[in-house]
Amino acid sequence: MTMAHIIARDVVVEFPIYDTAHRSLKKQIIHATTGGRIARDSGNRVAVRALDGVSFEIRPGDRVGLMGHNGAGKTTLLRALAGIYEPVGGTLAVNGRVATLLELFVGVDLDATGYENIMLRGLYMGLTRDEIRERAGDIARFTELGDYLYMPVRTYSSGMQLRLAFAVSTAVDADIVIMDEWLSVGDAEFRPKARERMEALLERSAILVVASHDRRLLGDICNRIFWLDHGQISEVSPAAIEQHEAGPWVPLDASPGAGGSAMLRQPISRP
């Protein structure tokens, strides 16, 4: 397996906005949803700066949780790590085979059969045709869909579709796993089986980066927590996010109060 490693130095991701000069309501909405991170880029276009000079290093063995309010930049960071978004500033080096579990249904054709979608989704996940054929039996057994796999996916219930997409997505061997929220599928009987499969995927990987609002979950599975706020990043103790209901946004220089702590957050040192 390749030595997995992620290094970000002063990474900037921006999204240009067109034709907003005379739309006051739209400008107000954009300002509210982006935290006011609106500026002009080098081409004098209005742009939202989703990531603003982000720097960090992630090494093999790291399980990194991303936290922050909606619009803080969590999904943008995940998509940048996955190669979906290209930074406009700084450098981002992602070394290793990446499994991107952001959109489970990308690559799924509703008019194709379950077996055909195992091939389609597997190719999207970066598997070769030979690798997919080797894994097809295991994927089919895990879904418990039986003869439904010979039928078009549009005939499936939403739960059956999710089982199929989840089974293929977790059949990869990756150095780096990128997730937006922890994946959990099925009813109460099937869910432990899905969790076991997810844990097996993580055991095969060297690095996990997952975004979630569930601080207890992140405290359980992550050894590092990154807190994003208006496109900037700091690191938080995993223990702190479970112990302090006020949240991990207490600044480093805060005065300790009763039961409080001044060490909930610290800036991430630059690599």
Image (cartoon, rainbow, N blue to C red):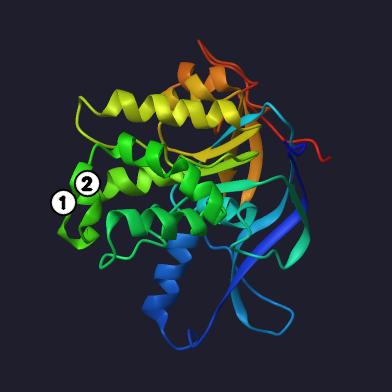
Q: Nearer the viewer, residue 46 or 270?
A: 270
**Residue farthest along the top direction in this orientation:** 259
Q: What residue sits right under mark 1 in the picture? A: 157
Q: Nearer the viewer, residue 56 or 135?
A: 135
Q: Is residue 147 in view from this perspective?
A: yes
Mark 1 touching mark 2, by CB under 8 A?
yes
In the image, is residue 84 above or below residue 146?
A: below
* Mark sitting on residue 107: none
Q: Nearer the viewer, residue 83 or 229?
A: 83
Q: What residue sits right under mark 2 in the picture? A: 160
Q: Quadrant of the N terminus?
A: top right
**How far from the left and from the top, in percent, is residue 146?**
21, 42
**How far from the left and from the top, in percent, is residue 215?**
44, 28
Residue type beneath disc 1: Ser
Q: Nearer the viewer, residue 33 or 225?
A: 225
In the image, is residue 113 above or below residue 266?
A: below
User: Measuring 57% from the left and 54% from the top, which residue is drawn there?
Assistant: 128
User: Measuring 47% from the left and 53% from the top, which residue is drawn there?
Assistant: 122
User: Measuring 64% from the left and 52% from the top, which residue is drawn there?
Assistant: 81
Q: Quadrant of the C terminus?
A: top right
**How far from the left and from the top, in percent, is residue 207?**
64, 34
User: Measuring 49% from the left and 88% from the top, which residue is drawn there?
Assistant: 19
**Residue farthest along the right direction in this orientation:** 271
Residue type beneath disc 2: Met
